Amino acid sequence: MGGVVKEKVLRDWVVEAREGGIYLPQVDLWMDPKRPQRRAVVTHAHYDHLAGHREIWASSGTARLLQERVPKRTKIRAIPFGKAVALGDGANFTLVPAGHILGSAMVWVKRRVGGKETQLLYTGDFKLRGGKTAERCEPKRADVLVMETTFGRPEYRFPAEEKVVEEIISFCHRAVREGKVPILLGYALGKSQEILQRVGAIGLPVLMERAGHRMCEVYRELGQKLPEVGCLGKITAEKVGGHILIVPPSMARGQRLKVIEKRSVAVVTGWALDRGAIYRYGCQEAFALSDHADYGELLEMVERVGPKEVRTVHGFAQEFAMDLQERGWRAWALAGATQMMLPLGLEK
């Protein structure tokens, strides 16, 4: 169980939700800001975590992926996992795997306060259960945990991955038997490669939209072994017949897929647990395979880090902070009002 810490700890770390990201003014460190900064840590290469920073600090894998996604003039410093980077005045940070997508990192920051070391862990997007194309998450103990809470409500507990994968494979085979083209919706970076690992060896050839196909090439360059996949390019009914297509969700309602009269479309996302998922994504089926932590994993992350304070961001941040308070942790959302329910002055 968690608990409340002495008020002194509140002064050890100042954490600000600014510019769409996280700023630590005591060590002058930006993490995942959405507006350009002089220098910032980017935890992974998804577009929603990028901005036109003058200099980007990222893990070695993310740095290579970013070369495909940011302007060529951008200065990128590749930092191997586990290597401490000095921030001045004795403070430093280390990147450790987050398990979200290939190269995704958590930021473990250390500084000294009153002669004693104190640590903060910022998760960025993370996943504790092992994926097929990302490094396994490696949480660190810390006094303060700043965590993303995309699926921070109890109803978001993902079913067993093996069962979901069986359903995806069955969906693909059934569509082909019915003379339809199975189309799986997943983002070009991360999700497309995870889907490919599941369906690339079931006896049906796979075609992937150009951006996802390029990311597969970079994944292989970084040491990932992926099944063979062709580049979709121009769509014709003859070309795609008998194939599985992996394309971004944005194509579901676009014109390109309308060339395929007989098609069966499914989205692969954690939001498949929502009742209206098929209408939201414009498809016939939805499969709950996610690269984010579900509610149970969010709770597990807190237990494994063992923080004195938890600060939540993104998704259901306020709801999850309140849940943590009820479980005995000192927690609140960085954005919006989260009423403190616990008495001050206790220690975990």
Image (spheres, rainbow, N blue to C red):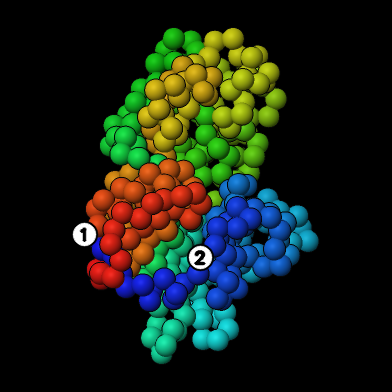
Q: Looking at this view, is 249 or 332 the one in front?
A: 332
Task: Name the residue at the right extreme.
Answer: 73
Q: Looking at this view, is 103 or 30 the one in front?
A: 30
Give the position of the N terminus as an image quadrant: bottom left
Figure quadrant of residue 258: top right
Q: Looking at this view, is 14 or 338 the one in front?
A: 338
Q: Is residue 84 above or below residue 332?
A: below
Q: Looking at this view, is 103 or 29 the one in front?
A: 29
Q: Residue at x 50, y 69 (%)?
A: 14
Figure quadrant of residue 56: bottom right
- Residue 87 relative to residue 299: left or right: right
Residue 57, position as x, y percentages in the image: 61, 67
**Total marks drawn?**
2
Residue 115, position as x, y percentages in the image: 41, 90
Q: Residue at x 32, y 61 (%)?
A: 330
Badge 1 crowding class, 10 Å Cα cut-off, few under 14, some 14 to 19, many 20 or more, is: few
Q: Amino acid at mark 1?
A: Met
What SS does tag 1 mark?
A: loop
Q: Amino acid at mark 2?
A: Val
Residue 343, position as x, y percentages in the image: 28, 62
Q: Kindly identify which residue carries mark 2.
A: 15
Q: Kindly identify which residue carries mark 1.
A: 1
